Image (cartoon, rainbow, N blue to C red):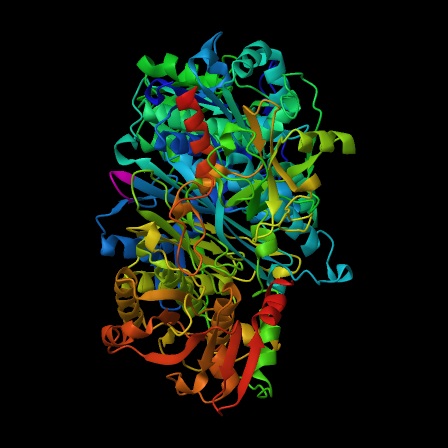
Amino acid sequence: MKGGLLKRTSDKLELMTLDLSLAGEKDLLEISERMGLALSLDEMKFIKERASRPLTDVEIQTFGQTWSEHCIHKTFKGDILTEKGTVRSLFKSYIAKATKELNKPWCVSVFEDNAGLVEFDKGYLAAAKVETHNHPSAVEPFGGAATGVGGVIRDILGVWGEPVAVTDVLCFGPLSTKQEELPAGVKHPKYIYKGVIAGVGAYGNNMGIPTVSGGIFFDSGYTGNVVVYCGCMGVLPGRLYVRNTKTSDYAVLAGGKTGRDGIHGVTFASADLSEKSEELRSAVQIPNPVVEERLKRATIRIRDGALASGVTDLGGGGLSCATGEMAHRSDLGLEVELKGLHLKEAKMAPWEIWVSESQERMLYSVPEVNLKRVLEIFKEEEIEVCILGKFNKSGRLNVTFRGEIVCDLELKFLYSPPKVKRRASAFRIPLKECKLKEPNDLGEELLSLLSDPNLRSREDVIRTYDHEVRGCTAGKPLQGELGGPNDAAVIKPLKDSWMGLVISCGINPFYEDPYWMAASSIEEAVRNNIAVGGRRVAVLDNFVWGNPEREDRMGALLRACEACYDFSLALDVPFISGKDSLYNESPLGPVRPTLLITGIGIMPDVRKAVTVDLKKNGDLVYLIGFTKEEMGGSAYLRSKGATGGSCPKVDASMSRKITEVLVEAIDSGIIKACHDLSDGGLGLTAAEMAIASGGLGLTLDMRQVLSQVRRGDLLLFSESTSRFLVEVEEEKSEYFERALKGIALSRVGEVTDMPGLKLIDPAGTESVLSASEMRKAWRGY
Amino acid sequence: MELKKSKACVLRVGGTNCDLEVKVALEELGLKTDILHMNQLADGTLSNYQMLVFPGGFSYGDYVRAGAIWGKEIFTKLRKELGKFTDDGKLVIGICNGFQVLVEAGLLPGNSVAGVPTASLANNSSAKYECRWIYLRVESRQTPFARTIKVWDTLWMPIGHGEGRFILPSEEALNELVKENQVIFRYAMPDGRPADGRYPHNPNGAAYDIAGICNKKGNVMGMMPHPERAFFGWQTPSQRGKRKARGDGRCVFEGAVEYIKKY
């Protein structure tokens, strides 16, 4: 670096000053790299051009943090150059656009605050947020996953919500991966798997928030890049939702001590993983759920007393982002003195304090009249607290350390980064026929699918998560007398209301076309929600993608976003919150592009929630929906190592028709059991219903299935969307069939008192699978 | 004592997280309940209450050993007052982490806040945290908490813990406990026979399938399962599409309320 560029300007503080006007292009890049900023040359130049004086390291770090992909989502807000022209902001052109056009009166706050807010019941709002914590989990699985959960719980606290449920969807490399095959710097999937699961459980269990919903997937596309989605849902009285920081309010920081853990977490998450990532272990934060439990108590007490004017959590970027955001969103400025902060280590440099992502910290704006009471509450809850400073009208972020100015930035400048430009190539997948020999024994195929790592029971994991704490879990993650799966979890969060919060997921990373992958994921989230009795579904999007600076990754992302717009509108489900994690690249290549859709529905009476287990001998079993030959990316094909075929598509108008009728049927009480069809198709769904049921089984006559598909295995395992398998009482069957007029409906069998599944294939050949052999295949015992 | 004039106190510290559902359960039965942080207790506060609950959670993170830190805190700060409380025949119940705390404080299976544990709730023999619904067999009605149920009744409730394996230092200690009718609940098979150590019916490997015990006098009880999570019918898992009209855990609190009424 050029001499004179970097100077130490204070004899008391570890503070450096950089004169960017002296820096050439090479120097700018070197500064970005050495200071761990992860800023591009354009961005560095942008700062250089607009800075009228040398900048301190605290200031430059503030830019690095605030402008990171993680914090500002520049790819989603930037310009995308395509063959057909420029897309200005994926976010505004697709995701938020659909929500705006749907314009639902029950959406109270979307994309604005720490979490999305929708109306719930009796003046209460429901809050929902889903985050990813992939990079930290790849380096330090336990801490990475635990702080992922901790972070998303704080997002709910950050909208004054009382957390009521946690969700987790996890994607790993195959556990059978050979150690020799892993390049340096990539940790073995088994190590990551164990750590992540322990981390998720430890945080939720310790905080006393039930972990009720999720999923686990294995694929070589995740070996180098583990995917950890953590979600949290909460409730709050609408009248206590306050976001109105005023000038002269105090900025109060509370919670854990600030340390050197979690420095540069966001910039670390905005770059590819490599062998060197291990050196960045310090970027992973250290979890302490009990501090967060106390912080939760204090936050709810402050909320109930209407003592604060605003709140936000400290996540990515630590203080540097939280303070700026809170001041900026209220068009204010803020003066901060760092001296009073509780530190884990005495000798931290001001910039380290400023960007540390140490966990379990929240920032509140508190009017002077309430300050004393707020401090008392923190004391009673044994929470360390520090008054950082006061909000003012300056529009500037002014930070001092022991009286010396270390940062003085105009917030308008800080929050108007240059727009990034990304190129997207058109996404094409070659059409390939799927060639697969027809198997002899469908029963055997079904048994082998039941034990597939991606389809088998998650009981061994689910039981390590407390899903009953708070005593509000009305729809359990394991259902029926023998622990079958569920479609969605149902929480009864309010004491004096039967209203349920219905939480579901949709995720289909194996469908090759990103458009239909996204479409089917949205439909699946809705389908799962409806299957238990949910309705008025809102959705959350969480993209996990590779490096957006590569045209092909960007092309695929664009295509997925197009589907988000199309199907959010067509299925009438607004997006209320979302988050993207890009730069998921490792020496093994990019992550398998993955979109998680979380569905948040409501149901008027939790006692009416429908489960998957069979209820009565002699009841009829119907398949709702039409079965097509849609095998592309299906679990069946993958289990055979085969590729090709076309992946499931979504007929939105049919889907809406089906869900509307099904909700009515559930409300009228004629649906005794219901399970949606997804991975593994009709075969898996029927088997799972039998597995969940004690003392009952079902027959499945494939000759009755409405379909053009004739081949048994394709009929049994096709993953066509918008389908449900339901149990209906015989006396109600006429009424039911009338209600579903105009919808593909097949009466495929009946409930019997023989535990297990009797399959009749298209040729009329019967095969019988006992419940115990299916159970053994599915859950291992 | 008239129920309207009585009150229960649910104590909490940092990491406690099952206090609210216990309050909901007790208030449903007409017993007014305050949730108090240990920091909110002043001298004599306890004397305002007829019942004291140590709820579940991870008090102080359960670092060191489950319940150990809070147990010691009770010994140092609350020994006298709690001693008087139990000597007066008032009720104390510890649920899950609360049971661990009472054992660590020496209150169970002993008879005073001795500060030295005489039993232990060790790591589950499965070596992991377990959350599941289990069956309990009522073994004795020595405690008011079991007064509204019958010996050999079967109850259905969830557990959620990583350290619940109840063990005693000797065979004699176990025999003594059994002889004194202090074993209240044992893990059982769905048909009500004792689980006899069989996993997952006995989910943690507890000696003699012990899930809950009381002190000699019966007014202090600790149990690993969560009666407050099996209080309302809607909290129970549905079976063949039906849920219980009322949860089996309700009886534990009903027993306490009946006792308070007569106290």
Residue found at the very far top of the displayed protein? B43
In this rendered view, identify the residue nearer to me: A82 or B218.
Answer: B218
Image: A234 above or below B9 = below
In the rendered structure, the answer to whether residue A176 lies left or right of residue B48 reads right
Is A557 rendered above or below residue A34? Answer: below
Residue A214 belongs to magenta span? no
Placement of B115 over or under B189, stated as above or below: above
Viewport quadrant of the N terminus of chain A: top right
Magenta region, residue range? A119-124
Nearer-the-camera pick, A63 or A452: A452
Could you tell me which residue is drawn at 33 percent across and 38 percent down?
Answer: A495
Q: Position of residue A91 (x, y in %)?
A: 36, 53
Residue at the spot 63% in from the left edge and 51% down from the top edge: B200
Q: Residue furthest bottom?
A: A763
Quadrant in the picture for residue B15: top right
The chief SS type of the magenta part is loop
The foreground one among A406 and A462 is: A462
